[in-house]
Amino acid sequence: FRASDFQKARQKYIPALPKGLQSVNSTFAFQDLPVPEDIKEKFPLISAIKYVEFQPTDVPSTDEVSPLRIGVVLSGGQAPGGHNVIMGIYDYLKRHHPSSQVFGFLGGPRGIFTNSFREVDHDLMEAYRNQGGFDMICSGRDKIETEDQYANSLKFCTALNLNGVIVIGGDDSNTNAAMLAEYFMKNNSQIKVVGCPKTIDGDLKNEYIETSFGFDTATKTYSELIGNVCLDAASTKKYYHFVRLMGRSASHIALECELQCRANLVLIGEEVQEKNHTLSYIVNELADMVFRRGEMGKNYGVVLVPEGLIEFIPEVNVLIKELNELMVGKTGTEEELRAHVSTSLSPEALELFKFLPESISNQLLLDRDPHGNVQVAKIETERLLIMLLQNELARRNFTHPFFAQSYYFGYEGRSCLPSNFDATYCYALGYTAGSLVKYGYTGCMAVCRGLTQNPENWKSAGCPLATMMNIERRKGKPVAVIKKALVELDSDYFRAYAKMREFWKYNDSYRAPGPIQFDGVGADSFTYLLKPPTDH
Ligand code: FBP
């Protein structure tokens, strides 16, 4: 690991810990949380687990302490702060007993059922303190799915003599953690399974999870770039910049960046869905803005497009749903698959399928992740919109210049050095997860609450995974999954944008938030997702 001078400086950063985790021993406050009946049927054992909050205590324990052994896995897409979760687990375990050990499963959940791991020892941990990326043990998108994979997971974790497995992942990965916890309990294993809320998308969020880690750093990184693009637009006054932003489904990232930078327009997928805005409605909204700005002598602007938008457009959504059902278990060449869907899609869906440029319809048809999701990160929605907008402007005889530039800001935001917030939050999550294993809790997610307060006052807890689940259709079947949190149109967060959007469309109010700061001005700023704006 060849660290730059700045990486070396960050290795020395010591995140603060919530008071409830500062003492070697903990006391707890319990709470029963409701679990839907259909989830209880599927997860009878972990559904009985209570919410447990760590309370500060000075009372020393008289219990004899023996070393703990914990396996950790990074699951799904990268999110800044993953190494700090491991650092929290490591420091917690070493404080508990110096002979405790942390094992990192390599390459995601596959590492668990193939017995591929490395020990996180002192030197490895020192190198990765407060660092970006997931490269210490790497990640993967495999799920533990088959009976053999579950049996092997139990066999290898038992052989490693683990007290617990900590799954650092998003909604799908934590659903998988819940299944593993249930499986271990059903098989009378004492190995605990605890989740940690990771995803830059910000959609693993509920009453107990105030934000997923990585969102803070990723949106600050994108906002820096968008702010620069906005200033470039205002300087040369000759380009429309269309920026597609990562976020597989929810539009949290795009909305956060809009509130930070005040681009001329952001399309919010959830609004498109709720108000049933069709592709042509969206193109008309863009054309109206370009037209009016043109009349004002402004032939430039910035538009933000969430990558999940495509799935929210009603007619595209119907097409995706039909394709999902038709593609279950189907393999073949592109021609064979096209022939298959052409004879089976409804007439409306087929019309749209044929209307979309081939590169886009191919993405919908061919690229699925192991969870059955369309890989929206690869669909060039911004180019599709530019193309349709050009046609519409021509149809309206728009006489001003229209030059569009397109961008995709995605992967560059997922592995950067974690902001102070993410570094501290992740460290506390790791500590919490380690404590939950030590005190024998399973089937729960490590959470920290009160995040806009000083970290010392954050409340650390274990929240039952079963309480976060609902039934959804996946790969054509009803399955129990953790509910995704989408942008709510009646939230202060969205309203802050809705109130200003007409103004920002025509009166350039661009802001450049600048790069992430680790000291001084802005170093401890919160996302608007956590602290909705009051002064917009
Ligand atoms: P997670 O849900 O696993 O955190 O991943 C989210 C994400 O970063 C999305 O924003 C993006 O659509 C997707 O991963 C890209 O996935 P991949 O890394 O497989 O290309």
Image (cartoon, rainbow, N blue to C red):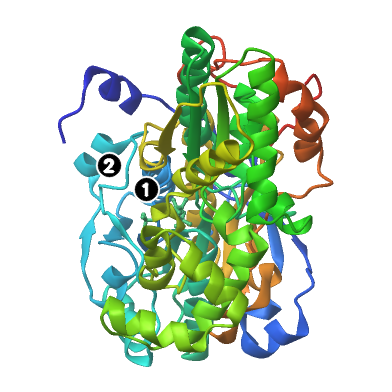
Where does residue 424 sit, x and y in percent of width and height? 51, 34
Q: Name the residue under label 2.
A: 125
User: In which quadrant will I find the N terminus?
Assistant: top left
Check contact, mark 2 vs mark 1: CB within 8 A. yes
Q: How crowded is mark 2: few (under 14 residues within 10 Å), some or many (20 or more)?
A: some
Q: How crowded is mark 1: few (under 14 residues within 10 Å), some or many (20 or more)?
A: many
Residue 351 vs residue 323, the one in the foreground? 351
Residue lying at 52% horizontally and 90% vertically, measured from the top left? 186
- Horizontally, is 373 left or right of 456 in the view? left
Marks 2 and 1, the one that precedes in the sequence: 1
Q: Hey, what amino acid is under mark 1?
A: Tyr
The answer to whether any part of residue 373 appears in the image is yes
Q: What element carries label 1?
A: helix
Q: In terms of image quarters, where does ligand 1 lie?
A: bottom left
Residue lying at 54% horizontally and 85% vertically, measured from the top left? 476
Q: Quadrant of residue 458?
A: top right
- Horizontally, is 343 left or right of 367 in the view? right
Where does residue 118 sit, x and y in percent of width and height? 21, 59
Q: Hey, what amino acid is under mark 2?
A: Met
Residue lying at 51% horizontally and 22% vertically, measured from the top left? 401
Q: What element carries label 2?
A: helix
Q: In which quarter of the image is residue 296?
A: top right
Q: Quadrant of residue 406?
A: top left
The vertical placement of 255 against 37, above or below, is above
Q: Residue 90 carries which label?
A: 1
